[in-house]
Amino acid sequence: MDVCPSCGDFVNELNPATGFCLSCSPLNCMRCGNERTTPGHKFCITCQRTNWLERNADALEKEMAEGQSFRQAIEIVSRENRATCIICGSAIVGRSKASTIFCTKTSACRRARGRYSKLIERKGFSKDLALEVVLREVA
């Protein structure tokens, strides 16, 4: 545990760029220390792109080895990483597979998403069990 020199609170981790806790330095990028322009993100847009390129370097290299240009490889890899709704099967733009499982395009998707959240937050179900229950109800 560290102590934030700004507010005095005990925190698990201080922002390495500022030396303060995240609530005392919410506008600074965790990677470069520059001011963030996107609310709710830990990284500025430049560092977000750099992080994505680093995470997907192997897949990009594989596509480029197969003859694709760098831009084409980025398009292919981002298409492969795109989340799809498990209810209607449509692509969820701007989301990765790891963070999203439902879209909000149809009423059935919104109902399933609400039911899933309610099972986890109010009933205390695990994410896997809640997903299993929701999928059984939809089918």
Image (tube, helix red, strand yellow):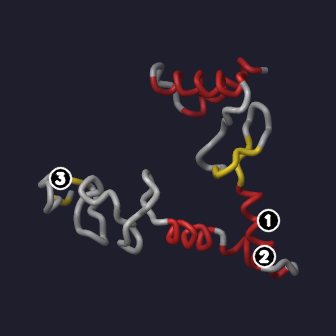
Locate residue 103: give its quadrant: top right
Q: Mark 3 points at which residue?
A: 10
Q: Going by the picture, which residue comes out furthest to the right?
A: 67
Nearer to us of marks 2 and 1 is: 1
Q: In this view, does 124 lie to the left or right of 111?
A: left
Q: Name the residue under label 1.
A: 76
Mark 2–mark 1 Cα distance, whole angstroms, equals 11 Å
Percent position (x, y) of residue 41? Answer: 45, 56
Please, what is the three-letter code of the amino acid marked with disc 2?
Lys
Q: What residue is shown at x 18% (from left), y 52% (from top)?
A: 10
Report crowding for label 1: few under 14, some 14 to 19, many 20 or more residues within 10 A (C-alpha). some
Q: Earlier in the sequence, mark 2 or mark 1?
A: 2
Please, what is the three-letter code of the amino acid marked with disc 3?
Phe
Rendered position, 53 above or below 104: below
Q: What residue is shown at x 50% (from left), y 27% (from top)?
A: 120
Q: What residue is shown at x 69% (from left), y 74% (from top)?
A: 58
Percent position (x, y) of residue 91? Answer: 76, 45
Q: Name the residue under label 2.
A: 62
Q: Earlier in the sequence, mark 3 or mark 2?
A: 3
Please, what is the three-letter code of the amino acid marked with disc 1?
Ile
Q: Earlier in the sequence, mark 1 or mark 3?
A: 3
The quadrant of the rendering that contains the C terminus is top right
Residue 116 vs residue 73, the one in the foreground? 73
